[in-house]
Amino acid sequence: MEQDYTDLIHSFHETWDTFPGVARIVDRTHHTLAVNPFAASQGMKVGEICAARKSPENHRGCLKLRVLSTGKAGIDRPSEGKIRGWLPVKGYPDVVIHFSLTLPEVAEWAGK
């Protein structure tokens, strides 16, 4: 029986729709189940295969499978000024929240 993600997707939007970076729910088979508005503005869509976006180099170091197997969050820094992470979701062993954020300059962040 396929898992119902309705409640998870609702909670995702309540939490991640104001996040100032990309956030998605991605399943074990790389399907995108939900995207926040920032991700949508970058052309990301529900139903797409996340690993098919851009080039294979963009997915180097992906920690999704490790997070799914260990149940522990993973984070990396693929380039200067950018972080990305994968968060397990309690009760949903086959999905992660995958986010990325370009870090602002200190002066920009401080509102100067």
Image (spheres, rainbow, N blue to C red):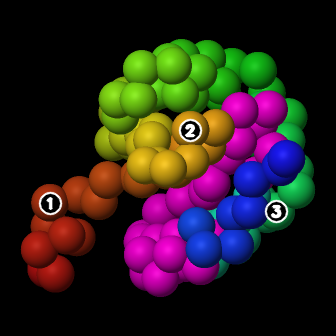
Question: Which one is closest to the eye, mark 1 or mark 3?
Answer: 3
Residue in the picture at 75% in, 53% down: 3
Boundaries of the magenta span: 9-32
- Left or right: 85 as drawn, with respect to 33: left
What residue is rendered at 61% in x and 57% in y? 24
Q: Which mark is residue 41?
A: none
Looking at marks 1 and 2 on the same chain, the residue that comes earlier in the sequence is marked by 2
Residue 56, percent across and down?
Answer: 76, 21
**Given the image, on which type of amino acid does mark 2 rest?**
Pro
Kindly report the distance in space between the C-alpha atoms of the residues bearing marks 1 and 3. Answer: 33 Å
- Residue at image point 42% right, 75% down: 15
Q: What residue is shown with label 2?
A: 93
Distance of label 3 from label 2 (alpha carbons): 19 Å
Amino acid identity at mark 1: Val
Tell me the quarter of the picture where residue 77 sits.
top left
Residue underneath mark 1: 106
Can you say whether 17 is above or below 48 in the image? below
Residue at (51%, 19%) from the top-left corner? 69
Label 3: which residue? 46
Instruction: Choose top left, top right, bottom left or bottom right for residue 37.
Output: bottom right
Q: Percent x, y for residue 25?
A: 63, 54
Q: Is residue 100 above or below residue 4?
A: above
